[in-house]
Amino acid sequence: MGYNSRICSVGGAAQQHGSVYWTKRGVEVLSTLSGKVPLKEQLKTAFSLLDSPIWEDSSTKKQCKQLETRVGGSARLAALTGSTAFERFTGSQIAKIKEDNYDIWERTERISLVSSFVGSLLTGRIAPIDLADASGTNLLDIQQGHWHRQLCDSIDCRLVEMLGPYLCLANENIGSLSKYFQEKYGFGNCSVVAFTGDNPAAYSGFESIGGCQYAPAIVSLGTSDTVLFPLEMYPYREGSKALETPDGHVLRHPVDPERYLAMLCYKNGSLAREWVLNTLMPECSSWEEFSQISRRCRRLAPRAFGFYYPMLEIQPHVQGIFRFEQNSEGDIVVPSSKRRYRKVSEFSAGISDARAIIESQFMSMSVDCRKKKGDSLKALAVTGGASGNALLQQVMADVLGAAVYVVAGEREQALSMPAYGGAVNAANAFLGKQHAQLEKCRYLLQQVCSPDDAEHSEYLEALCDFEYLRHRVEMNNV
């Protein structure tokens, strides 16, 4: 049985926005699971819907519009729930299931998110949904910390009860490990804390690691790029500037009831950088050459800007490739700086698409972070497939004006931060918040670079031009 009998508490994470639909029989059978029979056999009749919707399902445009209309528009929905209506969010998915599959809906007794579904299996009863993961549904009254009754009732008057009226934090004990897992795998009667979404759990993991005096923003440079950073105040208050462009998402902090997290998602991440390498730079055969060309080109802003969206982007909502160069006779005038630009099909000699896409991606992060946070970020913890690139690290530091850190420690390449964050939540719940034992953690955030103050000042001064041109691109005014 190994270490199983020594485990005292279990926590974890699961992919956000997915949902699971329980039958009445499924709810009943959870408490009677036998360790002698496979779960698959015992749960044959547990679900009213076998193919659950997940975050990749974007077929709910109609239902998104209905949610926004119900409360008075997209900005109002963002103010209430932390996000405008998103097709991948759970609320619109639930509404579509009821509308298109009423027979399935009639057989549905309870609804779990994927995270609370795992918690339900582990405890042998329907587990509560945690506040951070509930923030990804468009159904949570995010400031009050409970389901928004008007939104839920607009789908079904039973929906609050189906989701479970009680919501919890991700370090809250939700029960003990069921007899199924004790019998089958030799676990003791250990506690289970609420599971949360993968992004909030990852933040719990990063926040627990020492080596940085500030709460870091997490920048994931993967197929898509994401930024996750803490907020001391809710940004979408009535009359706030952030509500003028409510892009991205605001989530409840997984374990701190007084704080929030902002999450920005960019579909054109590493895939867009790879597209530039393979499509626009035939002379370049490797990422090393890509970095060398970018380094030689040095800072472009405000001399030139490029916007690279081979796929339809989330923010800004646009697709295509757009290039601009500063020109004294240009027909595009930035109101605040009075600098003139012209749109070009190709850059002039000495200006590289490799450098332009890197600057563009990090300047977009800077613009969008400032809308949510108001002030600059203090520290950046970078992760994901491209996180080891020294050039990306330095440009990120210069544009965002913050030191960049990576996870260092024993077997850091094998560290799954969402799973680690779930384990941290379990440890904190079992041993007490911020317990001394976590100081023995084998991982640290190690600083790899600092911003060049002169470069950051230049990027900061060019940010208004970048934002103005990006807005024109999105509005098709170019």
Image: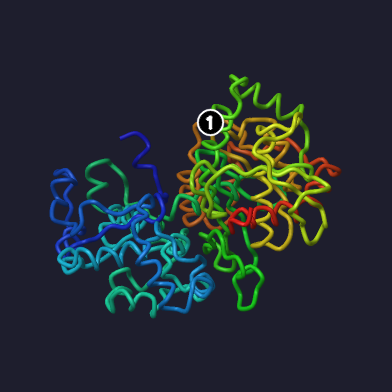
Of 318 and 253, nearer the camera is: 318
Residue in view at x 20 percent, y 67 percent = 105
For residue 434, above or below residue 185 = below
Viewer-nearest residue: 143 or 323: 323
In the image, taking residue 401 as reference, residue 173 lies left or right, namely left
Q: Quadrant of residue 405?
A: top right
Please state which of residues 341 and 163 is positioned toward the viewer in this rendering.
Answer: 341
Split into 4 quadrants, where in the image is the N terminus?
A: top left
Q: Give the left or right position of residue 301, taking residue 73 as reference.
A: right
Percent x, y of residue 314: 51, 53
The residue shown at (46%, 52%) is 426
Residue 234 position (above or below residue 10): below
Q: Which residue is mark 1?
A: 413
Amino acid, disc 1: Gln
Point out residue 324 in the picture as x, y percentages from the top left corner.
70, 44
Q: Is residue 340 left or right of residue 145?
A: right
Q: Assign a secondary structure to mark 1.
A: helix
Q: Is residue 9 above or below residue 90?
A: above
Q: Is residue 329 above or below residue 108?
A: above
Callout 1 crowding tier (Cα within 10 Å): few <14, some 14–19, many ≥20 = few
